Structure formats: structure tokens, C-alpha cells
């Protein structure tokens, strides 16, 4: 097989890079077509703030002039500075079921990373832990929730046959209306509130910019000790907040305040994939934007994306109150009947315990691979 690797250089080539996914998932009823405009945005090295602290190159594999695979090589300098590592990443991987093609793509990334004196390749990161990441390793018969990845099962073999090994698994828990809002969760939340009352309120959309600053401060403090954590820069967090503003439901973005001081937050989003899966073109125009806006009220599932408590207030049970309030407001005020808590590190005992308190069913797993470059 005559396979050539080409670097993506022009905007036209970048759009082709994005749209290659449609070839891989053609006829797959569980794939959610992404919004093309969103994918182009996160790959825009000139405008997206991620690339102010990182470098990346995008590549496609071609056979007889036809694209058969794609991949990104990423050096996240911010990550390596924080963790004192020399790790590089691969991401945005899509490939036909052919080991030779996959090997060519992986070889291209390892060569690119070695030139930057990095000693490990990890991934997939799209492009970091603050975005979509991980390779789905089970439940291929179910669509992903908002901002979660999806891939064919054969991708696992492509990675492992190349020599990649498991680095970390990420868990997703399925939540049901009738079991999550349990008497036990309610009792725990009430006990915590009696011990030291604090306020849980929805985000104030009229004061959105200041609310974003409050959430950003909590997030970067609460998650600082977690595996793979990279703090958002101010510009990067603001960029993400702007993207999410269109789909945020204030009832599902809660801020906890103690003595008037923000100490924690919970971010859940309506699962707009329920709408996007019915938009095969991946375009917002001419009708996609109306489907998105008009369909929001009909969404029946949500994803609990992150919940953070500042370090000095952790282990006091405040998280249980946020979980309780999130699910109460989701089900009783917004007609949510099910959802997902994700992603949770397999060895994060505190979060796994919280998932148990929510009566969550561990139904999906995502894998981060690593490969030595020495």
C-alpha cells in the first residue's frame, strides 16, 4: 500500500481534515456529527487561545490521492511545565481499519515529538484534558453525551498493535431520575447544610463575565492536584465560556457560597447531542441553528461535567449538596429523566464514592494510552 503523509497547511485542507470523520462514521447511528464550525475553531492555531501555550501540527494520510487517516501532534508546553514532564500528545485521530495507515500516522507524531526532545507520547487528547479526550473502550452501541468522545472499536487494536499501553482509564456513570435523587442523598445534603449552612444558587446570566471569573478561580484551585490537570488561562477559559453560553441552562450551573464567598461550583449541560445527532451535515446554517435553539426545551438528558470545591473546603460534604441540588433542579424543574456524570478518573476514590452516592451505573470507559519515545 502506497501511503503518503501530508501536513495540513491551508484552511481548505483543514476543513477536509475535519470532514474526513464523516467517511469513518458513515452509516453509524451512534455517531454524533460535530458542528464543523466548532471543530474548525479548536483547530485554528492563529485564533484559538490553546495554541498560545502549545504547539501542534495536523497531518493526513493519503492513498491514491484519497484521505484514509488523520492525526494531530501536540506539544502542550504548559502541561509539561506544571507536571515537570517531557510528554507529547496525539489527538484528533481518525483512521480506516488498516494497521499500516495507523502506523504511518503514529510514526509521524512520534517523529515530530522526538524532534522536540519529548520522551513519551500520550493520547488521545483533543487537544488537552480540558477538552474531549480518551478512546472509548466499550458501549459502542450508545451515542456519546455532550463533549465526550466516540470512536469505532477497532481503534483500540490500532493503538495497541502499535505498542501503546494503558496510562489511565476514565469512567462515565449513567444516572436515572428515579434512583439518583434518593433519600440517602437528600439526608446527606440536609446533614451538611445543618452543620454549616451555605447558599447554592444558579449562575446569574446577567452578570455572566463576573460569574465566569468566580468559576474559573474555583476550578483552577479545586482541580490543581488532579492527574493531567492543566489550568485554563484567562483567555482560554473565557473562550470556552463564550462557546457554552448559548447552551447553558442556569438551573444546571450552580455556585456554592459560604459567608458570601464562592467556594464551589457544579457545571452540568443539557445534552445537545440529542439534537446534533439529527443534524447529519454538521452545519448550523441554514436550519441547524434553529434545530439547536428550538430543541433545547425537549432535551431529556444532561451531563454533569465538573464539580469543584476549593481545597480548603473539601471533605466537608459540600459536594453532596451540589450533586443533590443539581439533580433536583434538573429533574423537577427541567424535565430531565437521565444523565451522565463524566469523566471521573478510575483512581479518584472521592469522586467514585460520589458516583456511588448518586446510584450511578458505570456504563462507559475511556482510555488514555502512552507510548515511550526513547
Image: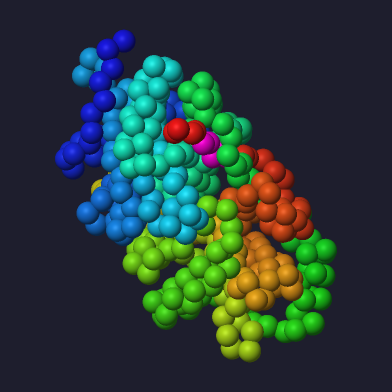
Looking at the image, which residue is at 27% across and 12% down?
Answer: 2
Q: Residue 169: percent from the left, percent from the top?
A: 61, 41
Looking at the image, which residue is at 61% across and 82% down?
Answer: 257
Residue 171 found in image quarter: top right
Task: Specify the segment rendered in magenta.
Answer: 366-370
Q: Residue 104: percent from the left, percent from the top?
A: 35, 23
- Residue at the outermost bottom position: 259
Q: Residue 327: percent from the left, percent from the top?
A: 66, 63
Q: Is residue 149 left or right of residue 49?
A: right
- Residue at the outermost top position: 1
Q: Which secondary structure type mostly characterizes the magenta part of the structure?
A: strand
Asked if residue 92 is positioned above or below residue 289 in the image, the reply reads above
Residue 96 found in image quarter: top left
Is residue 105 visible in the rendered image? The answer is yes
Q: Nearer the viewer, residue 298 or 169?
A: 169
Looking at the image, which residue is at 43% across and 63% down?
Answer: 232
Is residue 367 rendered magenta in the image?
yes
Q: Nearer the viewer, residue 200 or 58?
A: 58
Asked if residue 356 is positioned above or below residue 277 in the image, the reply reads below
Q: Nearer the viewer, residue 133 or 230?
A: 230
Counting the numbered discs, the total is: 0
Is residue 244 rendered magenta in the image?
no
- Image quarter hosting the N terminus: top left
Is residue 242 visible in the rendered image? The answer is no
Q: Residue 97: percent from the left, percent from the top?
A: 43, 19
Q: Is residue 168 left or right of residue 101?
A: right
Looking at the image, which residue is at 37% across and 20% down?
Answer: 101
Amino acid at each position: 500500500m502506497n501511503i503518503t503523509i501530508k501536513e495540513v497547511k491551508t484552511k481548505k485542507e483543514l476543513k477536509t481534515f475535519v470532514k474526513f470523520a464523516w467517511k469513518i462514521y458513515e452509516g453509524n447511528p451512534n455517531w454524533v456529527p460535530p458542528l464543523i464550525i466548532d471543530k474548525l475553531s479548536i483547530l485554528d492555531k492563529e485564533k484559538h487561545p490553546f495554541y498560545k501555550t502549545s504547539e501542534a501540527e495536523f497531518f493526513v494520510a493519503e492513498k491514491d490521492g484519497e484521505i484514509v487517516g488523520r492525526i494531530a501532534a501536540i506539544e502542550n508546553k504548559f502541561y509539561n511545565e506544571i507536571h515537570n514532564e517531557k510528554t507529547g500528545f496525539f489527538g484528533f485521530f481518525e483512521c480506516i481499519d488498516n494497521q499500516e495507515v495507523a502506523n504511518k500516522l503514529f510514526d509521524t507524531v512520534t517523529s515530530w515529538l522526538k524532534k522536540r526532545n519529548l520522551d513519551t507520547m500520550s493520547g488521545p487528547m483533543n487537544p488537552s484534558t480540558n477538552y474531549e479526550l480518551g478512546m472509548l473502550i466499550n458501549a459502542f452501541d450508545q451515542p456519546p453525551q455532550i463533549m465526550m468522545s466516540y470512536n469505532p472499536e477497532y481503534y483500540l487494536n490500532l493503538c495497541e498493535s502499535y505498542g501503546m499501553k494503558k496510562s489511565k482509564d476514565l469512567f462515565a456513570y449513567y444516572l436515572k431520575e428515579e434512583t439518583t435523587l434518593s433519600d440517602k442523598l437528600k439526608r446527606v445534603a440536609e446533614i451538611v447544610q445543618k452543620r454549616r449552612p451555605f447558599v447554592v444558587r444558579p449562575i446569574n446570566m446577567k452578570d455572566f463575565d463576573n460569574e465566569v471569573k468566580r468559576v474559573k478561580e474555583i476550578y483552577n484551585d479545586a482541580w490543581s492536584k488532579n492527574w493531567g490537570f492543566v489550568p485554563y488561562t484567562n483567555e482560554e477559559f473565557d473562550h470556552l465560556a463564550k462557546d457554552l453560553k448559548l447552551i447553558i441552562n442556569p438551573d444546571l450551573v450552580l455556585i456554592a457560597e459560604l459567608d458570601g464567598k464562592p467556594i464551589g461550583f457544579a457545571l452540568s449541560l443539557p445534552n445537545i447531542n440529542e439534537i446534533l445527532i439529527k443534524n447529519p451535515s454538521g452545519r448550523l446554517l441554514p436550519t441547524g441553528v434553529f434545530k439547536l435553539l428550538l430543541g433545547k426545551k425537549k432535551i431529556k438528558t444532561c451531563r454533569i461535567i465538573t464539580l469543584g470545591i476549593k481545597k480548603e473546603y473539601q471533605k466537608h460534604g459540600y459536594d453532596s449538596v451540589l450533586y443533590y441540588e443539581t439533580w433536583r433542579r434538573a429533574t423537577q424543574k427541567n424535565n430531565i429523566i437521565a444523565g451522565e456524570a463524566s469523566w471521573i478518573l478510575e483512581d479518584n476514590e472521592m469522586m467514585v464514592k460520589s458516583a456511588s452516592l448518586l446510584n450511578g451505573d458505570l456504563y462507559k470507559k475511556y482510555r488514555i494510552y502512552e507510548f515511550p519515545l526513547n
